[in-house]
Amino acid sequence: MTLRAAVLAVMASACAQPAPAPSSLAPAALGKLAFEDPLLSEPAGQACADCHAATYSFRDPEADHSTSMGVIAGRFGSRNAQSAMYAAQVPPLHFDPIEQQIAGGLFWDGRADSLEDQAGGPLLNALEMNNPDRASVVEKVRLSDYADGFRAAFGDDALDDVDGAYAHLTTALAAYERTPAFAPFDSKYDHVLAGTASLTASEKRGLAIFEDPARGNCASCHPSRPGVDGSPPMFTNFTYANLGIPRYANNLYFVQPAPLNPDGAAFRDRGLGHTLGDAAQDGKFRTPTLRNIARTAPYGHNGYFANLSYFLDFLNTRDIGSTTVGTCSRSPDAPAAICQWPAPELANASLDHRVGHLQLSQQDIDDLVAFLETLTDGSS
Amino acid sequence: MNRELTMGLVMLGAAACSPNDSGSTFVTCDKLAASPALRPNGWTGTVFTVVMENHSRSQILGNRDAPFINRLAKTGALANGYHDPYVHPSEANYLWMVSGENFGVLDDDDPKAHHFESTSHIADQIEMGGLTWKSYQESMGSPCGLVSHGRYAAKHNPFIFFDDINGWDGTQFARSQRCIDHVVDYSQLDKDIAANALPHYVFITPNLDDDMHDGSIADGDAWLAREIPKLMATDGYQRGGVIFLMWDEGGGTPANDDPPFIVLSPNAKAGLVSQTDYDTSSYLKTVEAVMGLGSLPCDLEKATVNTMDELFVMPLAPAPSIPGTQAAR
């Protein structure tokens, strides 16, 4: 056996057999088995966990492309896969009377109202796990080592009816996503709030900028203080914003053939506007939690920003330009000049003007990054 | 099956089941031993590596947006059988370029997330051989950038993942003088060329726009059209040097298409188009051969891959051993 063959053989065996499941598993434990099962895709080879890996804050470890590749090699979606952490804390899509804005809903565009709804999506998306229909997914579950676990948890006939079985599967996946593994609230900042850790000088400066309405004002959309009931801050108010993120020309979704991408290179992501059928909401995407943000590159709905400081520089200088803008032409011998950022993917009335000219210094941005790094679970 | 190989395969069992990471390895092995460089005849110059990003041969070769690259492809030697080491994303490929393995890394995280005690990498090997090296990183700014920022991506700078370079003291990165001296901003290259102070080994990473990661093919081509001639004009190139112009991995789509790999050198077979099956281990072994170095102890495929001899008119075999031979300097 050649080395390559040996490697592939080990890969195959590792992927082919999820751990056997006792018949008495709770839905969350069944959900974990399903979440990590690469046999649930069509063809076999991609689990939910491949784009939401537990050891990588439940995000896609392959962050080199702006979006994630599906089980079919070469197929990429239009959006940067979000971390599944703290997804259970996202409320259904609703109008927030306090914020006077649309809020909530899962996926970047809020189209799923519950974890169950969300979990059922990627399994059937041709750009992701590529099952043609629910029946093919359910058949895979029936053949799995944990099928009896579903029957024990949901009844002997749990897998008999396709729609019922699919609902049990998404219930189990959602139950897993509601476990503390996805929401440990164990960052250094949580420990600071609990009085068991302290911020460094740079982190303190970053927090001050983060909360200052006259400077970063980040906390207006990413609340950083515990709720009145003592609940830990979620670092999102779940509302929507069009930050003016540029079109990412190297997004491989643009080269997907129809019908995967009927619009080709002309595709523009309407976000919430598409969900609501309201052009006034075009270009808006849900404000993500900043918990674990330092571990979830790239940034933006289309993954335009490769690292955190670059994204912050954009938010700081979107309207005035920056020396770090890479896409402008410049002479190699000339000193770094201010260049304008590329136009927003969707430039319209929804563009958010709370960011774009924050007048932060490089030191301010470095301090903000230092503070944001304290939001990584397990960082204390 | 030896211990090293077993370790690698055990790691694979725990790895994600993505179809394109089958080459992932994490090998433990003996420490690198000092060995004077014994360069082959005709290879006294600088070994340049310029790494571009995320495009397949079919996207670059023959593309009107890449006129300069296509001219290079005709004047240099083209390795059309080249493929990456079947690891992804970028960082794993860059680690492989300098060490022959990816240490189990299948992500793009900065050194803060993972860094390695291993001394089995080409920088140590070069220094132990009595030669010199530098990594020139565009848009990095201050030397030894351990954190990605702006258009600089630490994931494309493999040397900073090794503790004997990044200055890891067991608790934190104490940016070492070695790192400051060797991992420098790209702007230093012009100064080193002007001072005739190029090292024997030069690793060049354009920024995220110029390397085609975020910028267009035309952007990358324009950057290369500006920069490659500078390298070709150096003594280090003209006197037995070589430029490896490579892409870390293919474009992701169409699937299974491999990246371009172009060799420029006074010693290259101009216009040769090779179809031989080469990979990143072949590249590393070729770099080592040109520099008169042995194989890295942890290079998993050191015994199974070949150097890219057919691309060159000058043989890559080590010069005959002569007692008292000093390392090339």
Image: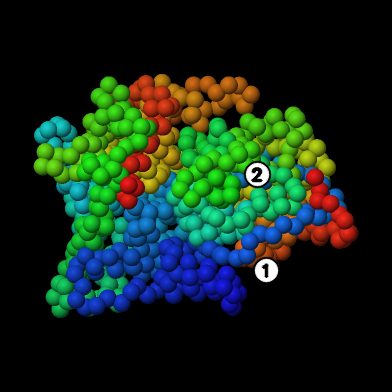
Query: Foreground: A262 or B168?
Result: B168
- How many C-alpha atoms fall within 10 Å of the one at disc 2: few (<14), some, or many (≥20)? many
Relative to A203, say whether A259 is above or below: below
In the image, is A65 to the left or to the right of B182? left
In the image, is B72 to the left or to the right of B208? right
Residue behind mark 2: B203
Give coordinates of residue B269: x percent, y percent: 80, 51
> Mark 1 or mark 2: which comes first in sequence?
2
Residue located at (61% from left, 56% from top) = B119
In the image, is A296 to the left or to the right of B307? left
Does residue A272 appear anywhere in the picture? Answer: no
Q: Quadrant of residue A306?
A: top left
Residue located at (27% from left, 50% from top) = A186
Q: Chain of mark 1?
A: B
Relative to A305, say whether B14 is above or below: below
Mark 2 belongs to which amino acid?
Phe
Give coordinates of residue A85: x percent, y percent: 28, 51
Does the CB distance between marks 1 and 2 fall below 8 Å? no
Mark 1 belongs to which amino acid?
Thr
As helix, strand or loop, the secondary structure at mark 1 comes to loop
Does residue B20 appear anywhere in the picture? Answer: yes
Residue behind mark 1: B304
Between marks 1 and 2, how big is the CA–CA gap?
A: 25 Å
